[in-house]
Image (tube, rainbow, N blue to C red):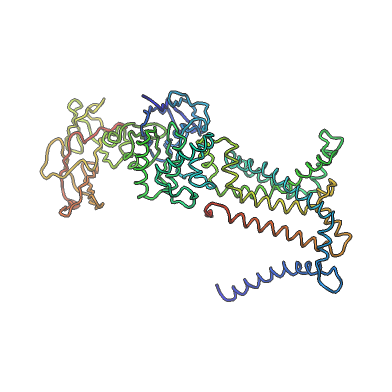
Amino acid sequence: MSLWARIAGWAALIFGLLYFFVPLSGLFEFSLRARRGVYSFDAYVRVLADPQFQATFSFSVVMALVTIVIGILIVVPTAFWVRLKMPWARPYVEFLTLMPLVIPAIVIVFGYIRLYNTSSWLPLTGSVFGTNVLLAFGYTILALPYMYRAVDTGLRTIDVATLTEAAQILGAGWATILGRIILPNVLPAVLSGAFLTFAIVIGEFTLAALLDRPAFGPYLQRIGANKPYEPFALSVIAFGITWGCLALIQLVTRFQKTAPVKA
Amino acid sequence: MTFLSLSHIQKSFGQVQVVSDFNMNIEKGEFVSFLGPSGCGKTTVLRMIAGFETPSGGTITVAGKNQSGLKPNQRNIGMVFQAYALFPNMNVSDNVAFGLKVAGRPKDEIDGRVKEMLGLIKLEHLADRFPYQLSGGQQQRVALARALAPKPQVLLLDEPLSALDAKIRVSLREEIRMIQQQLGITTVFVTHDQEEALSISDRIVVMNAGCADQIGTPAEIYNRPTTRFVASFVGTLNLIEAKVIDPATNRVAIGDQGVTLREPLGPVKAGDTISLALRPEAGSIAEGAKGDTALTGEVVSSNFLGSVVRTRMRVGTSVISFDMFNSPGLVPPAVGETVTLRFTATDLLVIND
């Protein structure tokens, strides 16, 4: 590589890092200015001590976990079956899983409200539990593109057909095959999808706001409209959660007990 | 007594007939190899025995029980795959124990059986290793132990040695045969490698285009091929065109030289053309030999192959190869030289097309 190419490469990298970190550092710096004249974590202390923060964050964490479980239960068997028995259907399923990226969340939530309102045949919005169920399914839809892709990529790294046949001939049924062979072998991929789902659910605003649920996303918006420093502290916390998820993805990928897959 | 019976088995994928009217009876404890080129249907037959494919026609019985409608996990059959197929998330012990755990066997029994199986394949010291920490040969031995652990009625081996290097292949095939004989388990082995099939089988089924061309012991398959396909697929063989002179005395002409065969020519008449087969190792050069079991021709090439020197000579329109064992004093015939090849009457076989 020539000297100029090397310099250009480093320059591009430094520009990229500055582009990313300068606004973030500005955000962080501003979040520390809650006390006049000195830097402090006052904004963070106030946010973390706010009962609303604790309630909405806990609610969103629980919803994220429920969404992850629903996502795994739907996506893992589907992706497995498509890969094993219906490879011809793969492009169609991929297309379907991409739909949430092109259909805005507001369209989905209005569709839900129209279909499941109190005067419909299944009045889910008529109770808190029903609305939470609706919200969890909505989150599952929003996370579907990421979860499906993560699981499908994981399945690509193992010989699904032969492992399934090897388990079958040893007496295993479908539940055993999925639970003890397929899922453990795509666990890093499933966890990647799970962490992405977690990050999406924690910050999601539209579904939670329009279904009137006390989630973290609407809380973020409310705080942002009314307080000067706390929204910035919350943004830093939200970034921290997302990065934490990404770090966990890296960690679980390193801990998988299989040989690195050749490209 | 027949233990595994395949009766009039057929299999079609859409319009393509992959297996047509396949019949075979296998005795208990027998080691049978399905030998044939890629696409001949041997793996399809194996997969039908395992239950992964459903026959389009015919019946499969194991120990007198019809296997139709039984899923693979209900058949009590062990199988070893070409790609090892060890479960990557489990160590060697857990892989071997898998079938027993699924069957709900007591823990003590599972531990004992796993130990026994690892002892059988001499890998007790690798019990805690994961598949990616094993060599190909070790993985395949673990796959064999895993298949045998639940004490299956039949063991199926689907080209288990294909992915291994030559040296490991030879040692592992001997190990497989030893274990099979030790346990007395009925085994079906699929391979496209004739040497493998010839070296470890009780019987070989040579398959061609979905049919069993010939079923016999390794010696029968090698020494007495009954079809042109078997003759050309198993070993190196000279296929020689000959003209019938007198069917009553089994007299034929190769080029302008007369030869008398030991075996009957079949339903042919004088003037018909038939195919004869002669193994390269069956003949030897004999200066001045003449008569019904000698052919004279001109040497067209001579190749040094290490342990043998393979010489090709032209007789009429046919080119016949013959081997001479290499020795320090051997002087191969020169190209253009006229030599006489002598053989015994039983070496020359009549081939059915």
Where is B148 relative to A199, above or below? above
Residue A118, image x, y percentages: 86, 37
Residue B110, image x, y percentages: 49, 38
**What quarter of the picture does the N terminus of chain B occupy?**
top left
Tell me if I can see residue A73 in this picture: yes
Closer to the camera in the image, B39 or A231: A231
Please state if A111 lies on the left or on the right of A198 as rendered.
right
Where is B22 relative to A263, above or below? above
Q: Give the residue furthest to the front.
A: B108
Q: How many marks?
A: 0
Please state if B264 lies on the left or on the right of B81 as rendered.
left
Closer to the camera in the image, A122 or A214: A214
Closer to the camera in the image, A82 or A260: A260
Closer to the camera in the image, B161 or A167: A167
Q: Give the residue furthest to the right.
A: A226
Residue A205, image x, y percentages: 81, 52
Q: Give the residue furthest to the left.
A: B288
Please state if A114 lies on the left or on the right of B73 as rendered.
right
Tell me if I can see residue B144 in this picture: no
Q: Give the residue furthest to the bottom.
A: A3
Where is A24 relative to B201, above or below? below
Residue B216, image x, y percentages: 31, 31
**What quarter of the picture does the C terminus of chain B occupy?**
top left
Please state if B64 lies on the left or on the right of B174 as rendered.
right
